[in-house]
């Protein structure tokens, strides 16, 4: 479904991605793990065409997108839902308008169809439409904001959903709720998902397939059982959350 080949990206002096090779299977959730500042968000920004590679290729559904023109990018964006790390709701719009936004941008749906879709999507993320439709983002809790962001992400029936740290900054119980919701959407919609996380244990709840990013490369891939039982000292250190070990931190 998505194939990344030899992806390299530098920002100024800093070579963030040093040759990423990654195949993301259709209909599954692939988790990209790694340290904060390691380049995880940079990888998914390439998948939505927000960044262009210095070198390498990105294939989505048989199309190489890193040289795509504006129209191609627009078509890809419609197919790919992106839940930003910040949630990124429009503060000046209420919940209804936030979820309706991509429908207005990308479809010719009339207001009745839009309303119906918005209500359906809010219900899918376990929000009560009547209670939340008129609220503004600053009137919502962190967990509710994430869920509204999720409802907006799935508004256009994407084939691919990219989640950038969907549970970061949330308490453990709300995190668990969001993880279950992602799992549920995966089962219900059968989409291909890519989830970025620095929380390996939380990501075991949602992921089918895992890839660990370290120093600009994918150093290990496998399923949850493989990651739980591996002897790779980098993965073990990450799993145990120890600052002592082979992983070198940037000063
Ligand atoms: N647009 C940019 N310009 C300059 N540096 C950037 C830009 N985007 C990311 N970086 C840098 O690249 C590194 C990786 O960032 P990021 O992909 O956000 O990491 P992660 O998501 O794994 O925490 C960081 O050092 C960050 O400061
Ligand atoms: Mg990030």
Image: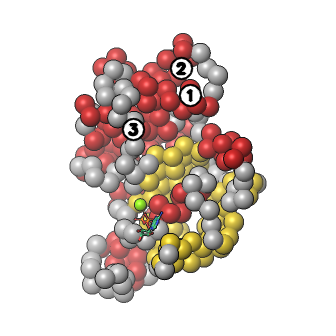
Real-space CA distance between mark 1 and mark 3, rounded to the nearest whole angstrom: 15 Å
Residue labelled 3 has its Cβ within 8 Å of some atom of ligand 2: no
Q: Residue at position x 26%, y 34% from top?
A: 138
Occupied quadrant, residue 147: top left
The reply to whether discs 1 and 2 touch (Cβ–Cβ < 8 Å) is yes
Q: Residues within 10 Å of mark 1 (few under 14, many from 20)?
A: many
Side of 3 where 119 appears, left or right = left
Q: Residue at position x 63%, y 71% from top?
A: 54
Q: How many marks?
A: 3
Real-space CA distance between mark 3 and mark 2, rounded to the nearest whole angstrom: 18 Å
Label 2: which residue? 114
Q: Residue 234 at what x, y percent from top left?
A: 40, 80
Does residue 79 appear anywhere in the picture?
A: no
Which numbered marker is on residue 37?
none
Label 3: which residue? 89
Q: Residues within 10 Å of mark 3 (few under 14, many from 20)?
A: many
Q: Residue at position x 28%, y 52% from top?
A: 169
Q: Residue 205 at what x, y percent from top left?
A: 40, 53
Q: Residue at position x 52%, y 36% from top?
A: 154
Q: Is residue 86 above or below residue 214?
A: above
Element marked by disc 3: loop
């Amino acid at each position: 479904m998505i194939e990344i080949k030899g992806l390299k990206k530098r920002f100024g002096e800093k070579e963030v991605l040093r040759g990423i090779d990654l195949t993301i299977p259709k209909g599954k959730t692939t988790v990209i793990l790694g340290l904060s500042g390691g380049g995880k968000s940079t990888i998914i920004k390439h998948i939505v065409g927000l960044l262009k590679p210095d070198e390498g290729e990105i294939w989505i559904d048989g199309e190489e997108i890193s040289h795509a023109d504006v129209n191609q990018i627009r078509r890809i964006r419609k197919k790919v839902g992106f839940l930003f790390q910040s949630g990124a709701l429009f503060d000046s719009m209420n919940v209804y308008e936030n979820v309706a936004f991509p429908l207005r941008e990308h479809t010719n749906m009339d207001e009745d169809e839009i309303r119906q879709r918005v209500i359906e999507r809010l219900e899918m993320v376990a929000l009560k439409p009547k209670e939340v439709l008129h609220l503004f983002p600053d009137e919502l809790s962190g967990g509710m904001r994430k869920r509204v962001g999720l409802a907006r992400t799935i508004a256009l029936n994407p084939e691919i959903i990219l989640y950038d740290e969907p549970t970061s900054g949330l308490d453990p119980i709300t995190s668990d709720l969001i993880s279950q919701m992602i799992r549920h959407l995966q089962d219900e919609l059968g989409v291909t998902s890519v989830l970025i996380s620095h929380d390996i244990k939380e990501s075991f709840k949602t992921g089918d397939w895992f890839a660990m990013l370290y120093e600009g490369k994918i150093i290990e891939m496998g399923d949850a059982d493989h990651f739980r039982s591996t002897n790779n000292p980098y993965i073990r250190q990450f799993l145990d959350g120890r600052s002592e070990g082979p992983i070198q931190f940037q000063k």
